[in-house]
Amino acid sequence: MTGRVARSGTGAEADLFWEDLVPGRRFDLGVTEVDRDEMLAYARRFDPQWYHVDEPQAATSEYGGLIASGFFTVSLFMRAYVDGLLSRAAAAASPGLEELRWLAPVYAGDRLAVTLEVVAQGPSRTKPDCGTATLRGSMARLAAARPQAPQEVLRTQFRGWFFRRGGAS
């Protein structure tokens, strides 16, 4: 739509468009630290399984302590994705996830590096002013509250619709 300003996923003026999301391009979405209070509040509200909320029982389990809900962990990924890419991308929406894997337990105090890679792109069949990008995200533990080797803790693959340059707002 000529003359209209393309907006990012957060409403700011966009500077990243579908044409910029070429296969192989990688984005460093930063590092997030798992906050114990947030982790527990989320689990108590949305996923109150014993290994997320019962500290004494979790301490004697194979986990050795409370672990984050996988859905809490993916919400940390989403926040990094919004802050690191969607805040500047002319994003339309997402037609959904293709993969979501929790690969290792996440603990309070863990520092997780978040990355994103463009796997594929193509024009949208239903939205002529948009293109589709297939994105693969990952979170890897850098440092842990517990002695563990750095490892990937989350992997996801999904598609997003992004406006073409000059395509829409």
Image (spheres, rainbow, N blue to C red):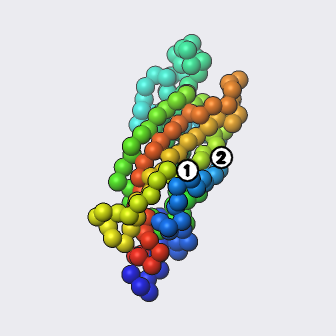
Q: Residue furthest bottom?
A: 3
Check the picture and name the quadrant holding the N terminus. bottom left
The structure residue drawn at horizontal position 53% and vertical position 74%, both measured from the top left corner, is: 13
Left or right of residue 34: residue 118: left
Q: Residue furthest left?
A: 126
Q: Which residue is mark 2?
A: 31
Which is in the foreground here, disc 2 or disc 1? 1
| In this view, 22 is above or below 141 | below
**Neighbourhood count class around disc 2 (C-alpha, 10 Å): few under 14, some 14–19, many 20 upward:** some
Whether residue 1 is visible to the viewer of this picture, yes or no, is yes
Whether residue 42 is visible to the viewer of this picture, yes or no, is no
**Neighbourhood count class around disc 1 (C-alpha, 10 Å): few under 14, some 14–19, many 20 upward:** some
How many numbered marks does the figure carry? 2
Among numbered discs 2 and 1, the one appearing first in the sequence: 2
Name the amino acid, label 2. Answer: Val
Check the picture and name the quadrant holding the C terminus. bottom left
| Whole-percent x, y for residue 153 in the image | 56, 33
Q: On residue 117, which mark appears? A: 1
The alpha-carbon separation of the residues under discs 2 and 1 comes to: 16 Å
Instruction: Report the front residue among 133 and 4.
Output: 133
Name the amino acid, label 1. Answer: Glu
| Whole-percent x, y for residue 34 in the image | 61, 39
Quadrant of residue 112 within the rendered picture: top right
| Whole-percent x, y for residue 33 in the image | 64, 41
The structure residue drawn at horizontal position 71% and vertical position 23%, both measured from the top left corner, is: 147
| In this view, 167 is above or below 108 | below
Quadrant of residue 166 within the rendered picture: bottom left
